[in-house]
Amino acid sequence: MPGSVQSIQRAAAILHLLAASAGRLSLAEVSSSLGLAKGTAHGLLRTLREVGLVEQDRASAQYRLGPALLQLGTSYLDVNELRARSLNWADSLAAHVAETVRLGSLLKNQVLVVHHVFRPDDSPQVLDVGTLLPAHATALGKALLAYAPTAVRALPQIERYTRRTVVSMPRLRQELTQVRRAGVAVENEEWLVGMAGIAAPIRGSGGLVVGSIGLSGPVERLCLTSGAPRPALAAAVTDAAAAIARELEPDRR
Amino acid sequence: MAEQYVLAIDQGTTSTRCIVFDRRGRLVGVRQREHGQRYPRPGWVEHDAVEIWRNVEWVVPAALADAGVDVGAVVAIGIANQRETTIVWDRATGRPVGPAIVWQDTRTSGLLDALARRPEAERVQDLSGLPLSPYFAAARLRWILDHDPGLGVRAERGDVLFGTMESWLIWNLTGGTDGGIHVTDVTNASRTMLMDIVTRRWHPELLRFFGIPEGMLPQIVPSLHRVADARRVVPGVPIAAALGDQQAALFGQACFDAGEVKCTYGTGSFLLMNTGDELVRSKHGLIVTPAYEIAGEPAHYALEGSIAVTGSLVQWFRDGLQMINSAPEIETLARTVDDNGGCYIVPAFAGLLAPYWRSEARGIIVGLTSYITRGHLARAILEATGWQTREVIDAMLADSGLPLTSLKVDGGMTSDNLLMQFVADVLDTPVVRPMVAETVSLGAAYAAGLSVGYWPDLDSLRRNWHRAARWMPRMTATTRDREYGNWKRAVQRTFDWIVDQP
């Protein structure tokens, strides 16, 4: 069995040190307090700063605890921030595939629609940002549930919307395993008859899933006769998810 | 036939970007590079024009590489630029004589006050279509000439040249010291205060008023006009259009018909209404400006209203007050409450622009009670942008007599749903966002592509415009009227704050 990870022990020590200090600490103070080489302490502090656990004052270059510590236990990424950072990529996905694009985020056991881009055909469409979708019956939801084990455990009775809605827990778990394997979630007339969805998880720093992005449209446009998603569309969705993930990398903030 | 592309350079206030567009107006490659902002004294803002030119030399080939497009497949280049930023450079060396003085710079306020007292001042406003304000380029140019005694004589001989950013870039792209072409497009020229808004030529009275030698001025050309082929960066590619960035956004939003309005929501916000080929004089504090001019056709005009502080108010809430960690979080905070709680914020940080033009006004937070929380302040901040939009739109409708059918929006703040809904509510009009958010670059590309026949006509460009989102008004008339009344009372309370100290 491998031993403890030393850098995590040291990072924890830095957080304890900063928490116990009244004001800010300089790099020299951190390294001497913990008996670390300056270069080592600097690398640790830089990484902690990138993930938001530590904050550096611009003028003095000194360190203190960061805002992410206060947010532990609440939402990791503000949904409005997620929308702002996704804007260009969601637009270009919708323009490219000519379908409706939505971004979702888990709110308890449901999917909160965080962003909505109209299908680019100028037909009457209604903005549905802020509405809630059933997680187990939508591609956006399954792309989130696959990476949220506690949300899956907390699902209440799973409701049937169509003949094709997955209502058996073992089958849902099986499907979520498939989502993790493929990196893509599909919804094939499981929520609305005639409609399909393709979605992919959006990963934030460190691989944490912070949302999902997906297309929706008529089943014959999105899926093959086998029921599988059209490969070109699935690729466009995962590409957009990857582009947003890059946008969320700490150094681009 | 191999696919062909149009290239847009957007030389903006904080960065220079190059975007490659295809025939359907889709973005296929993009690169961007920021440049330094210098604030040598309070109110002063400067750029290094050489740094900006180097950024152009870098972003253009990088964007082509990003798109995987060869220079040979580019049919035209269009330029959109930050307006009113003033550069003077030496024709023989190609070096600027000093820093570029940026449109946000207010060093010429005192100079303007003195000029405004002269009897011809009113005539200057009639001729140029602009209010006397440090916002426009002429006073900056005067300031540069005043601060280098040798410059005046050299300017008369045409040894030193004046230009706004597009002039500087075109001169460099067409060879620089080796035969560079010295032109400015009509939309940029109109922002100097030296151009006659009707004839679209430099006017001798305006030149005399500001004491500007004509020898240093560029030739005014239509916005859609094949200036020359580039000799540097993208050799052989025609430079086919140039527009000020806000006029480019109007073009990119396909606002080609009289009555169409767009608003770009950024650090500040800029509303433009196309008034067709009719020049509408504003009686309500707006600016008259050419929207675009196609070579060989009459110019199209626009009414413009600028709002100085919108996105920057959110930045102040984040950085100055440290109420939020990132700008989009203001929406989260604002949604913690149902309304503004009776609190209004008027961000007259450096006075008020359209439709008031009160430089002595300063910002206020009014209606404070112990009930007010951070959430109410966040709401009041977003609402300030909504009400300022309403005031400019009201002035546009009063001046033009045209009805408002919708407002087309772009810019970073369009990601704020609460704000966009509020704008629709206070205007009682649908607000629509197009699918390509990069309307400034798209407008430059459209203009250049149209100029060389890559797109056949304006209709083909209209067909490229697609709605990405639409917010419908939901507020009751009673609420809207009451809130607008409160806002107006708040604005009144910002006036006459700055007084001359003895």
Image (spheres, coloured by chain):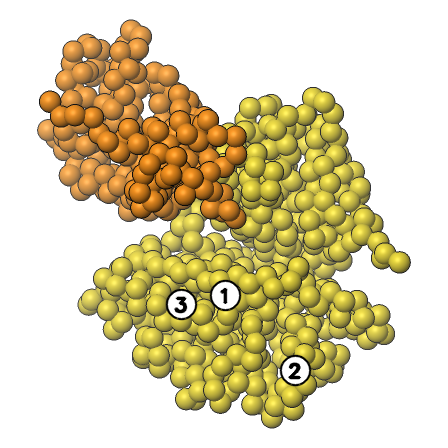
Near mark 1 (Cα within 10 A), the count class, few <14, some 14-19 or many ≥20, is: many
Q: Quadrant of residue A176?
A: top left
Where does residue B119 sit, x and y in percent of width and height?
85, 74
Which chain is assigned orange?
A
Asked if disc 1 and disc 3 are in contact, CB closer than 8 Å, the reply is no
- Residue B418 visible in image: yes
Label number found at residue B411: none
Query: Vertical placement of B272 versus B143: above or below?
Result: above
Q: Residue placed at 33% from the left, 18% from the top?
A: A134
Front: mark 1 or 3: 3
Which residue corresponds to mark 2?
B148
Q: Relative to residue A85, is residue B376 drawn left or right?
A: right
Q: Relative to residue B88, is residue B53 drawn left or right?
A: left
Colour chosen for chain B: yellow
**Amino acid type, callout 1:** Asn
Where does residue B35 sit, x and y in percent of width and height?
46, 62
Which residue corresponds to mark 1?
B81
**Amino acid type, callout 3:** Asn
Same-subunit check for callouts 3 and 2 = yes
Q: Distance between the residues labelled 2 and 1?
A: 27 Å
Q: Earlier in the sequence, mark 3 or mark 2?
A: 3
Secondary structure category for the residue under label 2: loop
Q: Which of marks 1 and 3 is nearer the N terminus?
A: 3
Secondary structure category for the residue under label 3: helix
Which residue occupies the foreground of this view, B222 or B438?
B438
Q: Quadrant of residue B200?
A: bottom right
Where does residue B216 sit, x and y in percent of width and height?
59, 85
**Amino acid type, callout 2:** Asp
Q: Quadrant of residue B5?
A: bottom left
Label number found at residue B55: 3
